[in-house]
Image: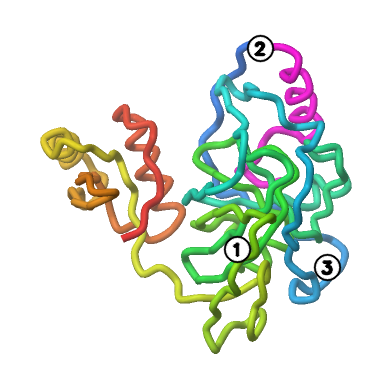
Amino acid sequence: MNAGRVLAVPLALAIAAGLAACFSTPSQPSAPAPTATVPPLPAAPAPGPNSVPDAVPRAEPRSRHGNPPFYDVFGIRYYVLSSSVGYRERGVASWYGPGFHKVRTSTGETYDMYGMTAAHKTLPLPAYVRVTNLQNGRSVVVRVNDRGPFVGNRIIDLSYTAAAKLDMLRNGTAMVEVSTIDASVPSPPVASTPAAPLVAAPAVGASSTASPVATLFVQAGAFSDPANAERLAAKLRGGSYGKVFVREDQIGGRRMYRVRIGPVSDVADFDRVVAALGQAGVTDAHLALD
């Protein structure tokens, strides 16, 4: 387990099971901020990441365990989604390994750090997602069967092998995009660059490599009224966040005005800006593309 996931799996399972039957839990301390701690690598030789295939999406019933309507961790309430269809999120991924190898996950299955699995706070269990490392373009498919991570702004906790395929073991974290795969609907093949180091021509659900995203930003807010966007931008320009600007977009026939900061260069830079925004009362900041 790395710094992005501090709740022990058995405890997470107990909370989830308890909340399936009740609607309140004792208050808990605030979640600690992210740190630079990286999980230790396995003591024994690990199978090469290329020898482990990605998870293959298939229709599965909703797990009897780990899917309460909601649950509370560190004083924050998380609502489990009724469906994973259409879910997409950008943020920071972490990974967990030796300390939780062969420990029960929230679904009651055994965690295999050499498998292609992940933990997520709100997706129904199990679910299948494609995780793309926005910093290098690598992409994998994993099966979500656990809860977490519960520290800071981490959005998904990956198995050791999944993290290895995304080339994020050394840093411990990476800026990623997570998008669900509907196992009941066939997906088109994923395009791959000629220099892809994982596979030459990935099929549905396979690892792939595409061009990395050139620029990443922190989005502090989105408004339909440009005056509201400019007010927030003016407030933030007085701080030490970096470049603050308002981007105008057309979405579904409506104009939206997004307050952006950046670009941000890496996870540490992203964490710094998000933490500073939190101190200023902006609690819903997230990762955004150009």
Quarter of the picture holding the C terminus: bottom left
Q: Which residues are magenta?
A: 1-22
In percent of width and height, residue 239 lies at 21, 39
What residue is pinned by disc 3? 46
Residue beneath the point at 29% across and 49% down: 252
Which of pointers 2 and 1 lies earlier in the amino acid sequence?
Answer: 2
Q: Secondary structure at mark 3?
A: loop
Q: Amino acid at mark 1?
A: Met
Outermost front residue? 185
Residue beneath the point at 78% across and 23% down: 17
What number is the disc on residue 23? 2
In percent of width and height, residue 201 lies at 63, 83
Q: Can you tell which quarter of the image residue 179 is in?
A: bottom right
In percent of width and height, residue 8 lies at 75, 34
Q: Residues within 10 Å of mark 1 (few under 14, many from 20)?
A: many
Q: Are marks 3 and 2 in contact (CB under 8 Å)?
A: no
